[in-house]
Every structure is written in structure tokens, then in C-alpha cells.
Amino acid sequence: MMTIQDFADTIGHAAASKSPLCIRGGGSKDWYGQDVQGTVLDTTTYRGITDYEPTELVITARCGTPLAEIEAHLAEHGQMLAFEPPHFGPNATIGGTVAAGLSGPRRQAAGAVRDFVLGAVLVDGKGETLHFGGKVMKNVAGYDVSRLLAGSLGVFGLIAEVSLKVLPKPVAECTVQLRMNDVEALRRLNEWGGQPLPVSASSWHDGVLTVRLSGARSAVDAARKRIGGELLDDADGWWRALREHDTAFFKDAGSLWRLSLPTVAPPLAPPLALQGTQLIEWGGAQRWLRTDADAATVRAAASRAGGHATLFRGGDRRDGVFQPLAPAVLAIHRQLKHVFDPAGVLNRGRMYKEF
Amino acid sequence: MNAAVAALRAVLPDRCILANDEETRPYECDGLAAYRQLPMIVLLPENEAQIMAAIAVCRQLNLPIVPRGAGTGLSGGAMPIAGGVVLSTARLNRIVKLDPTARTAVVQPGVRNLAISEAAAPHGLYYAPDPSSQIACTIGGNVAENSGGVHCLKYGLTVHNVLRVRMVTTDGEIVELGSEALDAPGLDLLAVAIGSEGMLGVVTEVTVKLVPKPRVARVVMASFDDVVKAGDAVANVIAAGIIPAGLEMMDRLSTQVAEEFVHAGYDTQAAAVLLCESDGIAEEVEEEIARMSEVLSECGATALAVSRDEAERLRFWSGRKNAFPAVGRISPDYYCMDGTIPRKHLAHVLQRIEAMEQKYGLRCANVFHAGDGNLHPLIMFDANVPGEFHRAEQFGADILELCVEVGGTITGEHGVGIEKINSMCVQFSRAELDAFLAVKRAFDPAGILNPDKAIPTLHRCAEYGRMHVRHGRMPFSNLPRF
């Protein structure tokens, strides 16, 4: 098994010899972001839950710990990772989950990966081992670098260990489906969002709105009466398939765009989106799009609506999969990259080609 | 008139510049009144363009800038720097837009925390973080400090409730971090900006999330004859799968002084009193209150009371909310600490604090955001007695070291500011502090924005003489000790 010191030495040597490294956990998200470059630095042997006290609502694990192992362990104590991360493969690790920064259906109600990161141990591009944050819920000592690592795609270093806030699983949960078009679905989702209803996930696709309710038994029952619709069997399996992109919509070949928009943004109209080619999640805040439109067109549409677009899978990736940054923001990105990885050897270009 | 005032007068209207001692005096400290410094100039810009112009002048003249909201902070983060400028955002106090359908509000930094909830109330919405100073503190300050409140276990801190921050850097650039959507491309710079204590940029606009106001809230008040039992009760409530809307603990001394002050109906014989709140729709609250009460009884509560109506709920809370002024009634001065600990160490930490009371000859009352482990010891002293303030400071520093020792942190919600800057040397290694300083340079290469706050220099740590120790290694071993 690798130790932190081994990682630090490997990274230190890579920096000294300017040899690029590609930090890799289970490889379940190799396809995400720009193409990977460099020698693989495998994290999977650095694994294990190092601290978990259910009553503290915090779990700490080494980066190579399988996500499935963490979820199973939490479930034994009636708890969960509330951001409901997608695995995208059986080998997903917790380090990769945090580095990728992807959240699942419950994100609309519970928050994203970054909202649950409490602390991290980072082996940076200089081979220094740095501790940020901690294992407590409230901590404002120093800048919140550990949250910055969520979604950083490894450009600052190896996230060797991470502490995450966990939550109890809801006492009751049920899922209902209603037939309606996208305009009506967005209208209802925004209306429900402003009321004390326990909506924990939502999805609209192809004329069907699916809504999950989670919370106290009485709250779920009351909301179900209010919302109506047909009860969905095997709801857990249904949401898992959605989370894992294991449905016909996601399995199609061709480019898949993820648009992050204000929930009130109007439905994407033809020619950008044709009937059946979009899937709405997160109360309207996350919209998946199948389209042949070029990147500039999709990004312009997302920007006009107040959000941004990511070429999630497939398509022409040469011009970058992530929405270009404003020059002043890009400048800060480059400066920060230089802080943690001055030799520029870690996951180079994985996020933006400029660093 | 000095050159700095002249240069600022050239770009700002006179009404935005205070440069006489009597005008600048009110800005010499923030909520941490024991630390004072008169600034050279106070600026009260009225819009973003004026902020940019002021920053450009300061940068040119290399004048340090201390941003300031309402000045309610408790760590000296807004304490001026000698010869420097205080940049108040108080006059940028407009709610730019409130969209009840999107459940967001776009506000200027000088808008008061509570004013957002008041504006959202007609739509059945509110802004969740509720620091106890919410009647006065501003959203710009909340962003700087990542403020929490008594409901943050369930509803989160500022970082969980802000979607977007617009700020001006000392480079003169306007940067937008986050977005009106749930995320933004690139690195999560918003997470770094929130809680950065005004050291990375001057906030000019904030988009906050609004959430539905719970229909009903009720609180259970439970007495315990032993602090350990009360701590276990907190753990058992969580273990039962309940996330209370609020979960607060008060020790005997704080209960007694609060009861004398506001007559909240507290059990003054109890070693600890817990307040455990549930909110939501009526049926849900009833269900949760029943489960909470059961757990608290099983854990040995000697008395239980559930608020029957809103008036009673507010009365139960009034003691907790007035704990600080209540302590102020029995002691000429008090010093509020803000460590966070893993909850399981609560009894141990309280025992050690009791021992410190003996050591320093000062009393200490403890209130505790029990749900999230954030402890507020209130150290009582009399500033007119020579040496007492110094003893109180040392007592406080000892408590913070204890928090780090048990795996916690020196500040849960009040920030480091100038107050706890030495304690940062205990919590972080040299390499970690270097990384923080480098992060600051990435945003503020000129180093003029609230310099010498929050992140200590290596030299300062060496002078402090209390070193970070991890794995038994002393990271400052190559430096001479003073």
C-alpha cells in the first residue's frame, strides 16, 4: 500500500523532472473533463475509512476507498452521503468523487459535494502534505481550501483523505409521476420549491415529471396528497438508474450536454432542443441536452439563460468541454494553480488547457 | 490635508470621506472592542464605481484597506490598520432584486441580514442563516465571515446559502464567483471567497438563496443533572436520525444568569439545559417532537417542557439569545470564545475549562451550539483590574489550544481576525500558512486588502512561541525562538 509519504515523493520527483502525472482513482470518470495526460498515479491502494462516528455526522476516508464501501458502511448506521454522488462505474473512489465534484438527484434539496466537504489532506504539486478544514461542522480558520478541492479535478494535487458531513437517511420516501409538458413541469417545480414541501429530487423527460418526497412520514404523506400523481414502484432503482445515467436517454450515442441554469430559465426551445431530447433535473437547475448544435450555440443559449454548459460526454472536445472563464477569473485560476502546483505537472489541462 | 485624502477627494464626493478623528472614531473597532486602532481615513462609497476608484487610489499609494460591513464582528476582522483606510459598504444597502419564483435575492453588501428575510416574508420565504447579530449585521460581513446561526445544523452556513458573489479585487477587476444557477464553471472560488475575512476582494453584490419559511416551529426544553448526560442526549438525538432545526446547550452558570435576566422559565438547578427545536408542517413537527422527547427522556432528562405556542417558544429561546447580555449584567466585561470540537469531547472540554477557571481566577459560562459542536465560553473579567484582561486573553488562547488538541478548530463562526491570529500558529503548519498567504496573493497581489489579519506570517508565529505540533515534529525548528 502507498503511504502519504510515497505519494509526496512521487509527486516531488515528477515536479523536479517536469514529468506530468495523471491522478487516478477507479478510473470511472476518465472520460470527464479534458483528455488526461501523463503517467498514471494510482490512488486505489490508499484506502480505508479512518474515522466514522455516526453521532458526529462525519466520515473520514482515504482517497482510494471505494464509494460503494463508504455508502454501504453509512447505510448500516442509517446514514448517507446526502449529495447522492453518481458512481459511473463499480470502481468509483471517494477521492475521485470529490475531485470530480458531481452530485446526484438529491442535490436540489441537500446540496452539492462541496457543501459536505469539511476537511481534506492534500498532497500538493510540491510534494507538501497540507491539512485544510477538519472533522467538525463549523470551521472558519483559514481560507476554505478543502471546499475548493471539490470539483478541482486534481489540478492542485492529490486529495489523499477527505472528511465529509453525512446525514441520516430520511424516515420516509416515496416517488410519484405526473404527465405534463416541460413548461408546466418547470412552473410546478418552481412553485413547489417556494413551499414547505419535502421534494428531494425531480426529473422531467418525455412528458413525464417524476418527483421524490423525503422526510418525516407525515410530511411525505401530506405532500403526496398535495402533489398527486401515480406512485412509482422500485423508486430506488429508478433514481439509481437516473443518477448513473443508465437510461435510454443517456445511453444514446452522440454528444451529451449538461446545462446548469437558474430554475426559472424557460425550457430549451427548438432547434436547440427537440421533443424528447432534454431531461430536466434539480427542480430545473440541471438540464441534460442531446443536440447536434455546435458548442458556441449551446454555450450562448446557456449564458443567455444565466448559466453555463458543459460538454459532458461525446462530441468534439478539442475546444474544451467546460464553459470558458472570464479573463479575470481565469487569471485567478492560473495563480492558484501556480500556488499549489508551480511545476504544472498534476492533471495538466484536465479542466482548462491554460493550466 | 494629506496626500491620501487629496487623492481620494479627487475621485469620491466629500460626503463619502471621513478624515477627522472625531468622525473616524466610531470606526476604531468592531464588536471586539478591546482591540482598537484609529484609521487615517474612512470611506463610505455609494456604488461599485466609487469602490473601484477608491481601490485604485489605495493601490497606487499602497494604502492598506480594511473592508467593513456593520462592524458587528467579534474577532477584530474590521479593526482598522494604522495609517490605513476603512472601506465601509454600509451605504450600498439596496435590495436590487427579489425573485420569489426563483427563490433568490440580489442584494448589495450593506443590506442587513434580517432585512432580506423581512423583504422575503410576504412570499413565505426567508434567508436561512441567522447569526444572533442579524438585526444589524450585513450580508457583506456575513460573506466575509461565513456566518452561521442557531439553525445552521439543518439549514447551513452562509457558504450553503449564497449562490453568487460579485467583488472588486485590488487589481481593479470585477469578478463574478458562482452564478444564478447552482454552480459555475471552473474552480469553486466562491467557496474560498466566503469566509475569507475581507482579504481577497471587496464584495459589491451578493445573490442569496431564499427558502420556504417553515409553517410551525416548536422547541423541547430538557434539564439534565449532569453535563455528560446532556452531551450523550445530543448524540442520541442525532443517532435517532433526527436533524433538529436548532440544538443548543447551556451550562448551569449561563442558565442561571439568563433566567435572572429574562425569566425564560429555565431550571436553574440543572447542570445543563438543552433546547431542541423542530420545524416544518404541523404533523411533521408533532412527529419529530414526540421522537425527540422520547430520546431525551431515555437519556435521563430530569425535566421536559415542550413549547405550547409561539409565545412560549420565543420565551424558551429568549434566555439563550440573551445569554451574552445576561453575562454582561453580572460581570463588567466578558470575552466570548468560539471554538468547535467533536461533540463527543464536550464533557472533557468543559471539565478542562473548569480547571482553567481555577488557574486564571476567572469565571466562565458556556453556551454551546450543541448540534454542530460550536462552543462559546464567555470568560468574565474586569478590565479595570490590572492584569485581568491579559489573564482573560490567555484563558481564551488556552481554550482554543484545547479545541485543536481534541481535533477541533479555533473558530467555528466568528473568524480569526486579529483576535485569534496567534492561535492559527497552533492549528496550522508552516506549509499550510504559506499556502493561505499564497492564496491571498492570487487574489490580492498588492497585499493591501486587510493585511495582517486571519493568516499569521511565519515570523509572527515564531514570536508567539507556541508552535504547531503534528506527529511530534516542530515545523519551525530552523528558526530562532524569542
Image (spheres, rainbow, N blue to C red):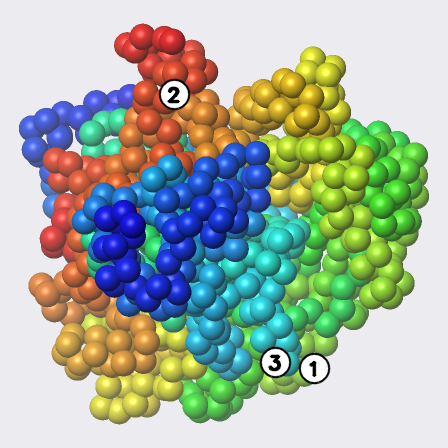
Q: Position of residue B149 (x, y in %)?
A: 62, 52
Using the image, determine if residue B427 lies above or below residue B113: above
Viewer-nearest residue: B238 or A125: A125
| Real-space CA distance between mark 3 and mark 2, rounded to the nearest whole angstrom | 50 Å
**Residue B151 — which label?**
none
The residue where tag 2 is placed is B461
The subunit carrying tag 2 is: B
Q: Amino acid at mark 3?
A: His
Residue B177 in view in this figure: no
Q: Amino acid at mark 1?
A: Lys
Do callouts 3 and 2 point to residues on the same chain? Answer: yes
The residue where tag 1 is placed is A225
Question: Residue at left 16%, top 74%?
Answer: A295
In the rendered view, does A335 fall on the left or right side of B193?
left
At mark 1, the secondary structure is helix
| Real-space CA distance between mark 3 and mark 1, rounded to the nearest whole angstrom | 23 Å
Question: Residue at left 44%, top 41%?
Answer: B38
At mark 2, the secondary structure is helix
Question: Residue at left 32%, top 85%?
Answer: A268
The residue where tag 3 is placed is B123
Q: Amino acid at mark 2?
A: Cys
Using the image, determine if residue B331 lies above or below residue A84: above
Question: Residue at left 37%, top 12%?
Answer: B474
Neighbor class of circle 3 (other Cα within 10 Å; few <14, some 14-19, many 20+) is some
At mark 3, the secondary structure is helix
| Real-space CA distance between mark 1 and mark 2, rounded to the nearest whole angstrom | 61 Å
